[in-house]
Image: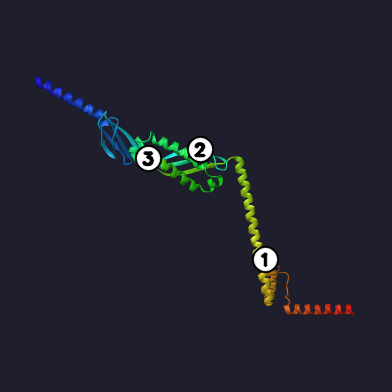
Amino acid sequence: MESTEIFSGYITWLITIVVFIVLLAPQIFKILREYERAVVFRLGKFQSVKGPGLIVLIPFIDKVERVDLRVLTINVDRQEVITKDNVTVNVDAITFFRVVDAEAAVIQVERYIHATSMLAQTTLRSIIGQVELDELLANREKINKQIQQNIDTQTDPWGIKVVSVEVRDVVLPENMKRAMARQAETERDRRAKVINAEGEFQAAERLVDAAKMIETAPAALQLRFLQTMNEISEENATFAFLPLPMDFLEAFKSMADRGKSGNNKNDES
């Protein structure tokens, strides 16, 4: 009878221990994914950075802060900014960053994601306030790089690497949009006039070259005359054009010149 009671007592203790372990298992064992790290504090003091995989902790003594090492994104809300040339614009951006030092991200700054977001907002406002509107619109990549380097320098002590910053939208006031539209239209008109002027200049050069060639080679004029007659004949099939030789025309011209000179002599006499 006594042995039965002793055995029952052992079973009770064993069940109690098993239940206790089962209840404490989540506090003892943690499984971390490949992209996660656990910053372990023992009695409030930093102990180590563990993971990935299965880690073992001391219940009620060890506390854990999980840190995600993947690239995270922060949307910088649209905000009103005044550029260097006193133009008010609304801009928003997106920031890509990742934690490279889990210990520093937890110990050196409170809520590192929120802190990085606030820093991105202030840096965006500061950098855009140093450039003019034309530069903001034309050199977006340069400004993105400048903002990224500025934020990355300030977050380096936090164990955070800023991968990139992209300024997404630049919203202009309506009066500025209309002014830029007029400027663009004026620029298009100017370019069209320049192109027309260049075309006329080239055409004039061609005419000068053609005149010089005809002057040195009169036969070229006759060939051009015959070509023109041929084109006219093709367009007007009902008419027949009989081109006159250039020598024939020259003969009439000589006769006309002699007649004119004779008339001049008679007038003098």
Mark 2 and mark 1: span between their CA atoms?
A: 56 Å
Q: Secondary structure at mark 1?
A: helix
- Distance from the alpha carbon under mark 3 to that under mark 2: 27 Å
Location of the C terminus by quadrant is bottom right
Label 1 packing within 10 angstroms: few (<14), some (14-19), many (20+): few
Residue furthest out toward the top: 1
> Which quarter of the figure is the N terminus placed in?
top left
Asked if residue 77 shows in the view, the reply is yes
Q: Position of residue 43 (x, y in %)?
A: 28, 29
Q: Residue 134 or 233: which is nearer the viewer?
A: 134
Density class for disc 2 (Cα within 10 Å; few <14, some 14-19, many ≥20) is some
**What type is the residue that disc 2 sits on?**
Arg
Q: Quadrant of residue 223?
A: bottom right
Mark drawn on residue 78: 2
User: Which residue lies under the disc numbered 3?
Assistant: 157
Upstream in the sequence, badge 2 or badge 1?
A: 2
Q: Which residue lies at the image location 38% right of the left edge and 41% below the top edge?
A: 156
* Residue 211: image location, x then y, percent: 68, 71
Q: Amino acid at mark 1?
A: Ala
What amino acid type should be assigned to the residue bearing mark 3?
Pro
Specify which label sits upstream in the sequence, 3 or 2: 2
Question: Can the viewer see residue 245 in this picture?
Answer: no
Percent across and percent down for residue 93 are 48, 41
Kindly indicate the quadrant of the structure image that contains residue 113.
top left
Q: Which residue is mark 1?
A: 204
Q: Quadrant of residue 12?
A: top left
